[in-house]
Image (cartoon, grey):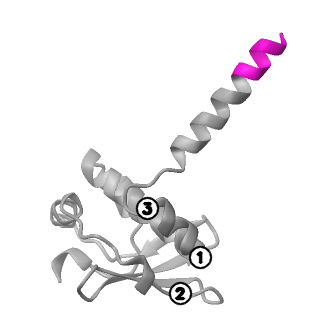
Amino acid sequence: MRNQFAFLLLLSMGLSACSSLLTVATPEEMETYPEARGIMEAWQEMTDLAKAGDCDAFQEYSRKNLMEEGDCKEAFEYMLDAPQIDWSKTQWDANKGKGKIYEKGKGDITSFIYSTSDDIWRFDSAFWSN
């Protein structure tokens, strides 16, 4: 019985560690910029949803009425070749739940606003058409 418990404990710890890995940010960036972790996770989820072609779920990361019919195709094309984010330039306002991300070597991409009602960071511009 103890062996089963130990196995389950190790398995759950391993799964937790795997689920916390992001490809849009390095472990060093996650450690250095913990205030941006929620935005990093939202950007990662958006990237994964674009790869999966899940428009409805992708739109959950959009502010109300921001995306129009047909925007997913353009947004997905953008996300599949998404730029690298310069997490060191992320502008952050913890009091207002806002953050802005920037492309490495270039300008801003979009801002995110945190929704306390459902714990989701949502983008507030059609960044794929800029």
Q: Which residue is mark 1?
A: 35
Give the CA distance from mark 2 to mark 1: 8 Å
Q: Say if mark 2 contacts mark 1, CB within 8 Å.
A: yes
Q: Which residue is mark 3?
A: 26
Tag nearer the camera, 2 or 3: 3
Q: Residues within 10 Å of mark 1 (few under 14, many from 20)?
A: some
Residue 90 position within the rendered picture, expressed as x and y whole percent measured from the top left: 44, 84
Q: Which mark is residue 92?
A: 2
Q: Which mark is residue 21?
A: none
Horizontal side of 77 relative to 39 (left or right) equals left
Q: Amino acid at mark 2?
A: Trp
The outermost residue toward the top is: 1
Tag nearer the camera, 1 or 3: 3
Locate the N terminus and report the quarter of the image it occupies.
top right
Instruction: Please provide the residue range marked out in magenta.
Output: 1-7
3 and 96: which is toward the camera: 3
Q: Amino acid at mark 3?
A: Thr
Q: Earlier in the sequence, mark 1 or mark 3?
A: 3
The outermost residue toward the right is: 2
Residue drawn at x 16%, y 78% as measured from the top left: 129
The outermost residue toward the front is: 28
**Residue 37 is one of the magenta-drawn residues:** no
Q: Residues within 10 Å of mark 3 (few under 14, many from 20)?
A: few
